[in-house]
């Protein structure tokens, strides 16, 4: 089963006059629901708040002032969610709203909070619907476009596939509106300056991002192991076709697998400042490979650490066993040393999950 982030640009959801095309939203929700029902995990990044706010307020042109745009986003975002919610209600699927600013993905602790919220939603079969928090995001804390936000969501959620749906069929060798020779680029193995040059000449009408932001998104998500497809949101059944690997739009190959990316980060990221000491049972389990580290097996801590830091794991004899990303911070873990996973919540008052280090977040001694 795949984990897929789908980004809907404003130009896909709304017509030229910025009114939401509810039939289109219903169709796109149906496409997502079909994948969800067979077990895929779908995460949506939906633009359209400002455009919808504009049409709700009866404003012809988008105002330039930031406070007015914030107001439009506030008006439009709740409407946007209502439309998505109703569209998914037809399939008996629940959705949840996630609003981000730049700080939520750049600050480590908030990044982990965002990841936890996403994981909780996905594991309860709720479809997250994310957007930038335009109502409170002023210039310095804005990401500015949902191409970038959707790429960051793909990174945070370790998605297999990111689909950027827009009003264009994909990336062309030249601007198809002015150059009859322009050809669709179907496959990109490597993003280079020539390609960035091609992208800078094309823009789409009502949305924020042109092809430049889509290429940047493909770079960000590709490095974290996601394949990225840029395609027209108007093409029939486009989401399932992109997932099936059919030739729709422009497909950017991932440069690494999500697991390789995570493991490379563990090996080459910040050096561990702390060590977890584990008992002989846990050491045996870790050495045999493929298992996560549970609090029950941890007997000691050396050095302080935050949630999400890379730490060293050693046996009580001081033998190096692994390096991994820890899911509890120092003081939390100090209280649950030796505790069985089903007793974590009773000690802490909450649980961040059963494992201290997940096997996918761990590189073992070779
Ligand atoms: N967050 C904006 C909105 O919902 C859209 C940004 C974008 O189109 O990239 O109106």
Image (cartoon, rainbow, N blue to C red):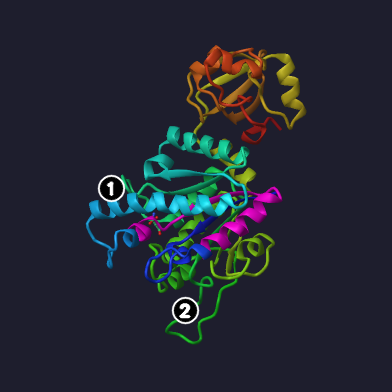
Measure how far apart labels 2 and 1 are at the Cα level: 34 Å
Asked if the beta carbon under badge 1 is closer than 8 A to the nearest atom of ligand 1, the reply is: no
Label 2 or label 1, whichever comes before in sequence order:
1
- Looking at the picture, how far across and down is residue 29, in whole percent? 57, 57
Residue 259 or 85: which is nearer the viewer? 85
At a point 43% along the width and 35% down the height, the residue shown is 110
Residue 150 vertical placement versus 195 (above, below)? above
Q: How many C-alpha atoms fall within 10 Å of the one at disc 2: few (<14), some, or many (≥20)? A: many
Residue placed at 74% from the left, 30% from the top? 289
- Which residue, given by chain and number where applicable, does mark 2 sit on? 174
**As drawn, 318 above or below 357:** above
Q: Residue at x 54, y 39 (%)?
A: 268
> In this picture, which residue range is highlighted in magenta?
24-53
Above-or-below relation of 106 to 34: above
**Which secondary structure is most common in the magenta stretch?**
helix
Contact? badges 2 and 1 (CB < 8 Å): no
Give whichever of 350, 34 is nearer the camera: 34
Read off the residue under disc 1: 138
Whole-percent x and y of residue 286?
72, 25
Circle nearer the viewer, 2 or 1? 1
Q: Quadrant of residue 334?
A: top right
- Report if residue 33 lies within the magenta region: yes
324 displayed left or right of 104: right
């Amino acid at each position: 089963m795949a984990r897929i982030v789908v980004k809907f640009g404003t130009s896909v959801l709304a017509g030229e006059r910025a009114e939401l095309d509810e039939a289109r939203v219903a169709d796109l929700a149906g496409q997502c629901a079909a994948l969800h029902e067979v077990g895929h995990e779908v995460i949506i990044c939906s633009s359209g708040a400002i455009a919808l706010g504009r049409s709700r307020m009866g404003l012809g042109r988008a105002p330039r002032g930031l406070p007015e745009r914030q107001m439009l986003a506030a008006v439009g975002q709740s409407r946007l969610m209502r439309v998505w919610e109703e569209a998914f209600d037809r399939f008996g699927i629940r959705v949840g709203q996630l609003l981000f600013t730049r700080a939520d993905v750049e600050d480590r602790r908030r990044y982990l909070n965002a990841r936890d919220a996403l994981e909780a939603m996905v594991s309860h079969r709720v479809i997250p619907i994310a957007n930038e928090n335009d109502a409170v995001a002023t210039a310095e804390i804005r990401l500015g476009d949902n191409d970038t936000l959707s790429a960051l969501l793909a990174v945070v959620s370790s998605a297999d596939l990111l689909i950027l749906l827009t009003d264009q069929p994909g990336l062309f060798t030249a601007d198809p509106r002015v150059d009859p020779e322009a050809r669709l680029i179907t496959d990109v193995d490597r993003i280079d300056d020539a390609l960035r040059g091609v992208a800078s000449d094309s823009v789409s009408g009502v949305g924020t991002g042109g092809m430049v932001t889509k290429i940047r998104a493909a770079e960000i998500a590709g490095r974290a192991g996601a394949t990225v497809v840029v395609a027209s949101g108007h093409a029939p059944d486009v989401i399932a076709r992109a997932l099936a690997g059919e030739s729709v739009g422009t497909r950017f190959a991932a440069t690494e697998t999500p697991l390789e990316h995570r493991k490379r980060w563990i090996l080459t990221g910040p050096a561990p400042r702390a060590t977890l000491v584990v008992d002989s049972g846990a050491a045996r389990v870790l050495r045999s490979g493929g298992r996560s580290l549970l609090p029950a097996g941890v007997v000691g801590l050396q050095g302080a650490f935050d949630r999400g830091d890379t730490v060293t794991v050693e046996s009580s004899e001081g033998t190096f066993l692994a390096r991994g990303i820890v899911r509890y911070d120092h003081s939390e873990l100090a209280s649950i040393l030796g505790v069985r996973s089903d007793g974590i919540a009773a000690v802490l008052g909450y649980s961040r999950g059963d494992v201290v280090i997940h096997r996918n977040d761990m590189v073992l001694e070779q």
